[in-house]
Amino acid sequence: MVETIQWTTDGVVMIDQTRLPREEQYVTCRDYREVARAIRDMIIRGAPAIGVAAAMGVALGVQEGADFETVCDTLARTRPTAVNLFWAIDRMKRLYASLDGLDRAHVVARMVEEARQIRLEDIDICKAIGSHGASLVPDGKTVLTHCNAGALATAGYGTALGVIRAAIESGKRIDVFADETRPFLQGARLTAWELQQDGIPTTLITDNMAGHFLHSGRIGCVVVGADRIAANGDVANKVGTYSVAVLAKENNVPFYVAAPISTLDLTLASGDGIPIEQRAAAEVTHVFGVAIAPEHIRVENPAFDVTPARYVTAIITERGVVRAPYEHSLAALGRGTK
Ligand code: MRU
């Protein structure tokens, strides 16, 4: 499976997700500013992977001897929606505070160790999500997914694609429909590539075909990832997820969200409080640098939407599968100890 992000003696090495699938190129971030740029420019993306990158960015900043608050603030200002970013920075901040008084070499070593540990934990978490979710996937049917919630969006294995991988590992004969995911094309560029690499039968469809196939009876379930889940079970994920969820309910197809506990934001009562990242107009007006719209056209480009909890059949986490009422089931899961 592809290596999304790694800590090396040269710096933080990431596969460049802006170039896939045409080129398999790796980028080495040698300081925390380069990590922040890589997150902002979506060289690395996907909520859990953003969290791992941020943790490694903090460790790099400490290693460089940069001002700690500046390091954390710079990384926190990269992308606002994925709560894993803030979760990871907070975890690194708590560790840093606990190391007060220790010599510099020891502090650096512990910060690096913690960032590497977050990466390793993320892979185990994805595998646990997969094993909890595998039984929900109907055998002999197609799974529809949106965006990329795979190995590329995590430290490895994936959340939504982890559920698919685990279902296949458990012997189920399934195939995948991947929404292309305009405007950034994570489905066409990343999910299609990642699943093809693993030999998982995959069909690429454009976003506006989802309703057609959900109505056809072929889709056994939808599985997507999440960037932030509010206390009532409202889910922020890649823009277009909401439309898929409504169409799934209309056609009696179960709609599952696969996400780690670090994606829960129980401080928010509902999805109304989730900050939605607005991205550059060029992502909409241009495809691979080629203009597809008239100059000066007004553009909106929200990167995420919020799916109300009533459309979510279940949320699959590393601690198990929870269902409505989410106020109770999510609170019972808790945010974890780290
Ligand atoms: O803008 P992106 O590509 O970072 O958005 C990614 C998604 O919306 C994913 O579905 C989500 O982060 C979950 S990744 C396991």
Image (cartoon, rainbow, N blue to C red):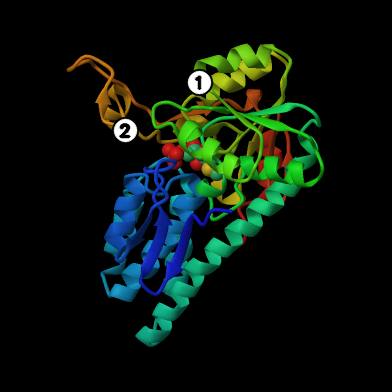
Residue 318 visible in the picture: no
Mark 2 vs mark 1: in front? 1
271 to the left or right of 163: left
Element assignment for label 1: loop
What x and y, as percent, mark residue 319? 71, 51
Mark 1 and ligand 1: say if the CB distance to the nearest ligand atom is below 8 Å. no
Residue 195 seen in the figure: yes
Which residue appears at 27% of the width and 59% of the height? Answer: 33
- What amino acid type should be assigned to the residue bearing mark 2? Arg
Report the front residue among 329 and 92. 92
Q: Residue 227: give x, y in percent of width and height.
A: 50, 40
The residue at 51%/15% (across/down) is: 208
Q: Earlier in the sequence, mark 2 or mark 1?
A: 1
- Looking at the image, which residue sits at the far bottom? 103
Q: Position of residue 31 (x, y in %)?
A: 29, 65
Three-letter residue code for mark 1: Thr
Dot 2 alpha-carbon crowd within 10 angstroms: few under 14, some 14 to 19, many 20 or more: some
Residue at the spot of label 1: 206
> Which numbered circle lies on residue 279?
2
Closer-to-camera residue (158/274): 158
Mark 1, other Cα within 10 Å: few <14 / some 14–19 / many ≥20: some
Q: Secondary structure at mark 2?
A: loop
Placement of 329 over or under 303, stated as above or below: below
At 34% from the left and 72% from the top, the residue drawn is 62
Q: Which mark is residue 320?
A: none
Viewer-side residue, 241 vs 269: 241
